[in-house]
Amino acid sequence: MAAESDDRTQDRQIADILIEDIVEWRILPGAWIREREIAERFNVSHAPVREAFRHVANIGLINVVPWRGAHVIEVHRHTVNEVFEMWKAMFGVVCRLAATTLTEPQLAELRILIAEYAELVTQTDNTFEHLAASNRVGAFIARHSGAGLAKDMLDRIALFARWQHHVIAQEYFSIEAGKESAELYRDLLAAFVARDPDSADRRARALLRFLQVKTAAPLEDYLRRQSEAVTPPGKVKT
């Protein structure tokens, strides 16, 4: 394994790479990850791989099965809805606190970030670019909210949000949808400028509710395709 310039241990380095591979669907939902294969991939012994699996399992992205390896979690309707409900709750808390903690220079910087997001969504309907830009805005708000615990929880939820976002095929989103989300961000900014925590909380939840609604159709399509893929030919899945 290539040497790293930071202070992470070997098992943490492996865990971080596996997390990114899972979140970006380079390792697909439901796939098995074998300890031996990962040890060979990184040219390490089994011990750090075992610890890496433990780190990834603690986040919730895999289930470790003794003597078999690790099984990547699968996309389920309940899981997706759970992520959105937790995401809305945590982002609401963060924005409620940010309404009273953001300084005027930070508000000016946030205004620029939101303007950049609004410009991006007029240039492309690439939903992954939209999500990445949106996450940068959300991360800025969380970083300056003074809500350390909520931010840590939000960061973990954001991993699952990125992971499940892969169910969205390109045709489900449009530039118009991007423009609508940009307008919701402007509404949120207005609540910050007004120093109104209740409004910031509501508008934060509304922003994520919009994405939740937009995710519903592609999620059902994805689940249908997965169901058809595992149904034997000639069988009717009940």
Image (tube, rainbow, N blue to C red):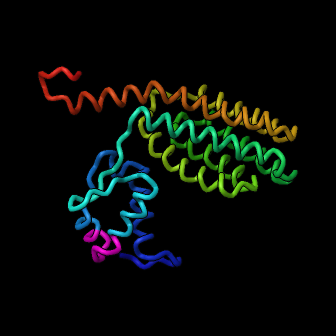
Closer to the camera in the image, 185 or 91: 91
Quadrant where the N terminus sits is bottom left
**Residue shown at 68% from the left, 34% from the top:** 182
- State whether residue 132 is above or below residue 204: below
Q: Does residue 4 lie above or below 187 as drawn?
A: below
Position of residue 67 measured from the top left corner of the image (x, y, whole percent): 21, 62
x and y percentages locating residue 110 in the rendered image: 76, 47
Q: Is residue 187 left or right of residue 83?
A: right
Would residue 24 appear left or right of 87 to someone viewing this image?
A: left
Q: Is residue 78 left or right of residue 213?
A: left
- Is residue 168 placed above or below 109 in the rendered structure? above
In x, y percent, where is residue 222? 36, 31
- Toward the left, the furthest residue is 234
Residue at point 43%, 50% (across, down): 23
Quadrant of the snapshot with the C terminus: top left
Please tell me which residue lies in front, 204 or 107: 204
Give me the residue at 59% from left, 52% from top: 153
- Give the left or right position of residue 48, taking residue 156 as reference: left
Q: Residue at x 56, y 42 (%)?
A: 131
Which residue is situated farthest in the front direction here?
A: 66
Counting from the top left corner in percent of width and height, residue 61 is at 41, 52
| In the image, residue 184 lies in the stretch drawn in magenta | no
Judge whether residue 41 is colored magenta: yes
**Secondary structure mainly formed by the magenta segment:** helix
Question: Which of the 4 image quadrants contains residue 76?
Answer: top left
Q: Which portion, as a residue range, is magenta?
A: 39-49
